[in-house]
Image (cartoon, rainbow, N blue to C red):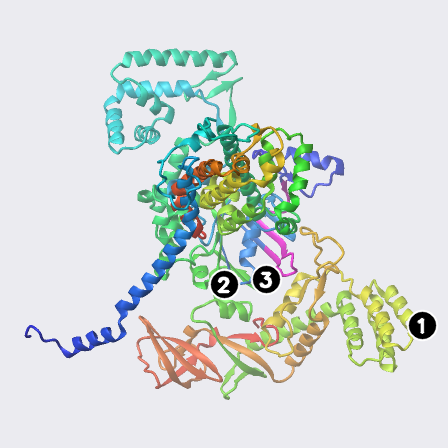
Amino acid sequence: MARNQITLEQYIGFRKKKEFGDKRNVKVGKIVAFVFLLLFCIIWMSPFIIMFFGSLRGYSDTMLYPKELFYPHSGYTLENYEMLLLGKLPEGIGQVNSVQDYKIGRWFLNSCFSAIGGTLLYLLVASLAAYAFTFIDFKYRNLLFAIIVASMIIPGAATAVGNQSMVYSMGLNRSLLALIIPGLGGVYGMYLIKTFFESIPKDLIESAKMDGYSNFKIFYKIVLPLGKTVLFVQGLFGFMGGWNDLIWPQMLYGAKDNDLWTLQVGMAYIINNSKTSNLIGSALAGGVICLLPVLVMYIIAQDKIIEGMSSSGIKG
Amino acid sequence: MVNTDNRPVDGSMEIPVKEAGKILKTSGYKIANAEVDAFVSLKDINKIYPNGVQAVYDFNIDISEKDFIVLVGPSGCGKSTTLRMIAGLEDITSGYLYIDKVLSNYTSSKDRDISMVFQNYALYPQMTVFDNIAFPLRARKYKRPMEATVSKAYDQAVGVLENRKEEFLSAHKSAKDKALNYGTVVEYVATKLGICDAAAKLLCKANVSDVEGFKRIAKAKTDEEKAKLSSKGYKIDKEYRLIKDGEIQYHYVKMSKEEIRTRVFEAAEILDLGPYLDRRPKELSGGQMQRVALGRAIVRNAKLFLMDEPLSNLDAKLRVQMRSEIVRIHEQIGATTIYVTHDQTEAMTMATKIVVMSKGWVQQIGTPKEIYQNPRNIFVATFIGSPAMNVFDAEYDNGKLVFENGYEIALSEEQIKRHNAFYEAKIIELNRMLNSSDFKKMHALKLLDGFIYDPDGQYEGSALESALDEIIEITKDTDCINEVKAQISAFRTQKSGQPKADRKLLLKIREPLLAFEKIPAEDIGMLHNAQVFSKEELVVDNTLYYQKPKKNKKQVKSNVNLNSTDVEFVNNLYEVANNLLERCESALHGRHPIRVGIRPEDIVLDSEFTGSKTDAFVVTANIVELLGSELLVHADFAGAKIIAKISTNTLIKPHTEATLAFNKDKILIFDDSCGDRI
């Protein structure tokens, strides 16, 4: 075949392609999607970006926003962080009307205790309850479960006062345990875990029972290893919920000794104290400090979260 | 943990209530019944689910040791429920279950010493094959002699260092070369040298070049333990067992790792699983997973194996292979097996005894040969055998079978005699049934219901009055006559002419009639078959009765009295029995419909067969299937499809005519109204 000749078949294919322009269409679609995603990404990211760069500006630059968002004319500084973490006020800032000291380290530990301890304890309680509701046949099981699930419709705010008086009457009004205990009765996580447990073939449990294993051993040896993805997901949700919770610790300790505050309560106090324009930087720095652990956690666990969310059931 | 050594006590012994608890406790909650001889015995087992569906009716079977019992039936016939009841995964509603002569209704499944193979294998996906098989062994504690463990370990280690040092070094090196972790190295060495794990651990830690030093340490440690034990009064014999007062001392301990290993390896040997022990179930094929499931069942040496359709997830070829494998394993380990399947081929090839079930009723129990050659009714006959038995509608006319197309078969003297005897026996039985008080009550109920559920009933008039008189007449021998009389006279005096109020009064007459006594299970079974297998159109519902949901009382799961008012009848049993009686009576005189069954292999080519046969007939072969050594010929005959199995000596082509005949000795005749074989 000569060099610049093509067969009719090839020509038809070529013309069809040109007519329908399949390549170009795909490109346009992709670009549109990309633009949209980028747009939303920027919208979602912008508060964080503003927060991060804002926290690095000195008190004298705070008003030059948004003009000098990324390049403050007096350069980057860590004075906001110093103020929060070390209690060192920058020179010439004037009066700061803070009544209580900032105890970021202490609050951080409190938050860790409430979020990590609460999550682990909740996982234990919820998975045991889910096991019982799935695999043990006891009287009024379904009725009990229906009641428990029905309690989900009551908003948390409505039960907060009751919880508070219960915790106080238990004598926990100066204990960090009060942050954890009411949350152990949460239904959502239990429901999630139960749904997953239901996908475990019942034969596995029956077979182990016939071999002579007790319920606790079956739970520990079979159900927990199989359900670790859902436990992981629920653990992450629990951690984030515990970390970000403001209302409950504020209710308990907001008016009390600031040794018991969590990071979120402290953060609220910092923001409250930073209403004058030159202190906005410190509020933003507080936000960065609160955000960091959750962000790190999420980046580490990102793969597992997606895996846990998408894994639906196991093969028998 | 229940002490497994206690002897069961006799359950029929009469004892005061207060002592019962104590006696039970001392016997480890084991009750035996002196009358039970069989290894596993089911007596009148019933299963009613909480929603009122009855899955199993009056299941009776005695299973002797080393039997291979197959429960077979179409899906939903209650066979799996029965198995699960034996396993203890499902409550038994009523009846008695004895396993190894111990009443096991209320023992939990782990105390019954049973192992089960599930349909989808129930392998633990997160464990290796080894762990899966070892899993049952790790559950409980076993009775083992107490041992001087330290002395044993040191003595074995010293023995190895003195005599077999090279062997140890090479084993240790090869384990290290395989890059195993420490625990596995120890186990590898222990298995290679045949010593206990503790000794292997000592050897792996020891400085091998300094044998004398090791010996010194060993002597010190051994002496220390001996002194400690002798201060407690124990002596040590040659096998390191502890002896106190001249007796070997036992204790309950978890099975040691060495023992688990040897037992798992044994099971793996039997099942050819050696190369797969460190894989996970995900990495196995279906047949291998099936074998692992079997291995988990056999490793525990349980008394009784239960298998719940273990082969139905495999492909056809593998199924045939595993079938013989299971039979081989059954013979090799000599356990008793109960096997559930819906596949009649599996039942025929594997069983020593088959139980055919349909809709919760046991239809026949027998050896495969018995079931095949002497099926008790039309269900068993058509269910067993492949291809299925040909069944034709025919008429019985004074010793002749007349088919729809006029084809006739003359019956022999003996067959005619049997026919008459069958119907006479049936009539006697039905009359006995109808004369029992429960059926009288049902008769009365039928009369009464005719008025109550009459849509434009006026609840007065001579018809009703005479019916009420008749009810008194019918029920005069039963225990409820006084109440019935009282209610009827109340109705007669209080009736007001308003339909609603009168209806209420009539319904009150119904109440005493509903209190049934015991209706024998065989009677209900017979009537059930008459409903299910008869061709009449008057059959409304196949289920004869179901459990009434109680409205006010709490539902008691474990103890339901079947024969009281808990049960509501869907069909009136009197009606069913009466119908049957009428048809049986008419069968003794003149023509009556009948069903004729003949197996495909008993339809023969007229020209080839020389035994006693019927007259030849000609059919047109619609489809001819060649199955290697034989032909399956499908054709139409006497208004039904006929399949004949013929050897390939004569080739029959499709759409040609073939001259066939029946093997006269193999013709089976079934009653049309209740399906029983005559």
Could you tell whether B441 is left or right of B65 in the image?
right
**Is residue A60 a member of the stretch shown in magenta?**
no
Q: Please identify the quarter of the rendering in which residue B280 is found.
A: top left
- Say which element carries label 3: loop
Q: Please identify the quarter of the rendering in which residue A53 is found.
A: top left
Q: Nearer the viewer, residue A82 or B270?
A: A82
Seen in the picture, residue A244 relative to B558 is either above or below; the reply is above
Q: Residue at x 54, y 63 (%)?
A: B76
How far across and how far down the image is residue A135, in percent?
A: 56, 47
Host chain of mark 3: B
Q: Does residue B105 appear in this view?
A: no
* Disc 2: CA contacts within 10 A as few (<14), some (14-19) or many (>=20): some
Residue extending furthest toward the left? A2
Q: Nearer the viewer, residue B84 or B620?
A: B84
Name the residue beneath numbered marker 2: B370
Picture mark count? 3
Q: Nearer the viewer, residue B461 or B398?
A: B461
Distance from disc 2 to disc 3, alpha carbons, whole Å, reads 21 Å
